[in-house]
């Protein structure tokens, strides 16, 4: 029994939307949750929706080989429409009135004060007009114009002065070049904010002299983002990727979003003009791309979360040499609660340390202005051997990765690009230092990317170690990635590391079966897992088997979950919970057993088909007693949250874990307090 992955993901996004409706969340943060919801939904249409529509039209025999059913597209469509309706209600009935209570007027489909009209005209003429490029929809327009993905446009209906000729035009809203929101002059102590959209609407007549603007409707296109790459690459892969990226924003339409007041005859006209299908057309509000709410002007910082300063480990602050510390003990960081500076220090010191001879790293998603990559460039310029495996198939980060690849290559970094059919998703690095006695290797294994920007709001774990077994196995893996030799692959053996394509699936199966054996022998047996996505059917079946054997299975799954909990005779011993809060839950933890026999692992791998079968992922078992306890306590704080945690039912309803008599426990705050006490 498996739940559909796309419906499960939509349930996760609905949980994000619920945070926007939660009045205990600060007002600006509620707007950010609306932004995240909107951004997530855009990505869903770019990545998944076209496949759902296509697969739902296949014959039943083919559908049986997938989890697609005839009514899936209808269910997905219905869920999205319902969520969009609730989104609009939250924004217009809760957020905007609350802004007004805090002396902030957000012009949202409302009349504009007379005193602001002159100001709006000046903004339009001085800042906006230069970026507007109207296009008439005549018989030749398609040859010179195709709406880009996620860009905002107006569909304008025009009449000539003598009312004899009717014309349509498209006007771009240049929100990618200019702010989406403009602050206007305060009136009676109230601050005013307006969309760039409405500034343009108020001045449309200036764009079409000699014509009358009869109507104006906002529209947006989402386009399929899947890259059409051959399994085997020929020629320069970088050039091929760049060529595909240039085409991506003009791919097939996956959603056409239009203002809900648009008349049917106008809908039919634009459907014909852009060859749209009915199931690609969605009615929306007057304003699209509300992911831009994340950039809403801040007037009162008290309407946002109080800042939590990252916690610095005292023994790191007292020493200027991170390698010397690592020679004495492992370091385990819990991001963003702990400062990310030790990771940056690791690479910056490696870049200038004369005894460092080599640096190896896997890069999946890096910051736009990456401190880590700049350190690698410095290291190469200082004569060190630097090897970077760059995954240029990281969806939506391809351009950034290509940019940094070129800069690193120019500096002398050895760049290794993608392996056909496989993404390298592991987050690992290795530094080798030369000493008089023997070379010493220092490793980083993380659940998250080497990205100092996302490290501010993604929760992850970072292990830094000189454990000889771990560093030797990591060097083996880097050598394999560097050479991609099938003969060498067959000879690789991993003990401390779990590596997909090698031993990961077998090791996870063995750990689950050990708990099953304990349960069958009457011993305490428990499996605790925290991951982002759970989809791979063989792993789900093993968890079902464990449940039937009496093993307690506690799962914290952030988004996609295809396992169905609480089914008699199948999964009655499985509990699935979901945690959405101020930080994005991103870490992966695997805890098998209890008491003294507990096994604790962390790593980059979700239990998805792609992660376990089509990627290079790395997990590592934690042996340090103190670090094991920290990770178990970390899991327990989240499992016992009664503020933001929800529990999934068999029909995938989401019920908050709240008890009237319980003392409130917010896991993310509790973890911060716990780590602060550790200091």
Image (cartoon, grey):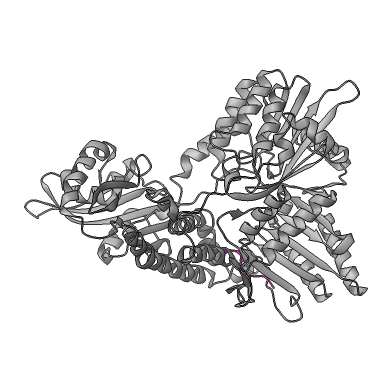
Comparing 593 with 152, the one in front is 593
Q: Is residue 606 visible?
A: yes
Q: Position of residue 115 (x, y in %)?
A: 16, 50
Q: Give the number of callouts.
A: 0
Comparing 471 with 282, the one in front is 471
Res 390 → quadrant? top right
Q: Position of residue 620 (x, y in %)?
A: 80, 48
The N terminus: image quadrant? bottom right
Q: As displayed, is residue 294 above or below residue 535?
A: above
- The extreme left residue here reads 162
Q: Is residue 415 visible?
A: no
- Residue in the image at 77% along x and 58% along y: 632
Comparing 494 with 258, the one in front is 494
Left or right: 665 with respect to 197?
Answer: right
Left or right: 186 with respect to 564?
Answer: left
Q: As displayed, is residue 257 above or below residue 312?
A: below
Q: Which residues are magenta?
A: 1-7
Left or right: 405 with respect to 39?
Answer: right
- Residue in the image at 26% along x and 36% along y: 130
- Residue in the image at 90% along x and 69% along y: 518
Instruction: Say if the magenta span includes residue 586.
Output: no
Instruction: Say if the magenta span includes residue 6.
Output: yes
Res 539 → quadrant? bottom right
Q: Position of residue 321 (x, y in %)?
A: 74, 29
- The extreme bottom residue here reads 568
């Amino acid at each position: 029994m498996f739940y559909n992955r796309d419906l499960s993901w939509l349930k996760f996004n609905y949980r994000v939307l619920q945070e926007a409706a939660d009045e205990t969340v600060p007002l600006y943060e509620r707007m950010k949750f609306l932004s995240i919801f909107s951004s997530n939904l855009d990505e869903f249409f770019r990545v998944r929706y076209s496949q759902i529509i296509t697969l739902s039209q296949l014959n039943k025999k083919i559908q049986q080989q997938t989890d697609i059913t005839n009514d899936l597209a209808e269910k997905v469509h219905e869920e999205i429409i319902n969520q969009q309706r609730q989104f609009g209600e939250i924004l217009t009935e809760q957020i905007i009135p609350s802004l007004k209570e805090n002396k902030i007027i957000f012009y949202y489909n409302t009349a504009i004060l007379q005193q602001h009209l002159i100001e709006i005209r000046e903004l339009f003429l001085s800042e906006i007009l230069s970026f507007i490029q109207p296009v008439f929809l005549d018989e030749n327009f398609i040859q010179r114009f195709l709406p880009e993905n996620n860009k905002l446009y107006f569909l304008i209906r025009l009449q000539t002065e003598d009312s004899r000729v009717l014309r349509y035009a498209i006007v771009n809203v240049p929100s990618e070049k200019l702010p989406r929101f403009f602050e206007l002059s305060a009136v009676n102590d109230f601050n005013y904010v307006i969309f760039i959209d409405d500034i343009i609407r108020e001045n449309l007549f200036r764009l079409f002299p000699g014509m009358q603007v009869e109507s104006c409707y906002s529209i947006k296109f989402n386009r399929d983002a899947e890259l059409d790459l051959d399994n085997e690459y020929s020629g320069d892969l970088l050039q091929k990727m760049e060529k595909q990226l240039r085409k991506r924003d003009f791919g097939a339409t996956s959603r056409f979003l239009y203002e809900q007041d648009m008349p049917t005859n106008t809908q039919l006209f634009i459907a014909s003009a852009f060859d749209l299908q009915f199931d690609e057309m969605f009615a929306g509000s007057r304003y699209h791309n509300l992911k831009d709410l994340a950039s809403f002007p801040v007037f009162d910082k008290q309407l946002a979360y109080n800042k939590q300063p990252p916690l610095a480990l005292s023994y790191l602050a007292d020493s200027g040499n991170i390698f010397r510390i690592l020679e004495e003990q492992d370091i385990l960081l819990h991001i963003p609660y702990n400062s990310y500076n030790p990771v940056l220090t690791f690479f910056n010191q490696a870049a200038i340390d004369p005894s460092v001879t080599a640096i190896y790293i896997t890069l999946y998603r890096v910051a736009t202005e990456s401190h880590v990559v700049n350190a690698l460039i410095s290291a190469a310029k200082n004569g060190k051997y630097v090897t970077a495996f760059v995954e240029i198939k990281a969806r939506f980060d391809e351009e950034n990765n290509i940019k940094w690849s070129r800069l690193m290559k120019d500096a002398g970094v050895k760049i290794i690009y993608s392996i056909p059919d496989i993404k390298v998703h592991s987050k690992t690095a290795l530094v080798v230092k030369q000493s008089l006695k023997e070379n010493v290797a220092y490793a980083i294994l993380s659940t998250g990317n080497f990205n100092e920007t996302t490290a501010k709001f993604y929760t992850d774990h970072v292990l830094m170690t000189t454990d000889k077994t771990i560093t030797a196995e990591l060097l083996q893996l880097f050598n394999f990635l560097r050479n991609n030799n099938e003969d060498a692959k067959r000879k690789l053996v991993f003990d401390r590391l779990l590596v997909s394509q090698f031993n990961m699936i077998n090791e996870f199966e063995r750990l689950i079966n050990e708990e099953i054996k304990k349960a069958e022998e009457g011993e305490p047996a428990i499996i605790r897992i925290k991951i982002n996505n759970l989809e791979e059917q063989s792993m789900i079946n093993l968890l079902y088997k464990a449940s039937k054997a009496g093993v307690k299975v506690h799962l914290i799954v952030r988004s996609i979950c295809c396992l169905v909990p609480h089914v008699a005779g199948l999964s009655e011993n499985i509990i699935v919970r979901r945690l959405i809060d101020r930080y994005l839950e991103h870490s992966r933890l695997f805890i098998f057993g209890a008491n003294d026999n507990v096994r604790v692992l962390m790593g980059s791998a979700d239990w998805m088909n792609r992660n376990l079968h089509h990627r290079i992922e790395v997990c590592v078992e934690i042996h340090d007693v103190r670090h094991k306890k920290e990770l178990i306590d970390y899991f327990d704080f989240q499992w016992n949250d009664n503020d933001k945690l929800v529990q999934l039912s068999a029909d995938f309803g989401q019920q908050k874990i709240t008890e009237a008599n319980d003392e409130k426990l917010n896991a993310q705050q509790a973890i911060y307090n716990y780590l602060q006490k550790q200091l």
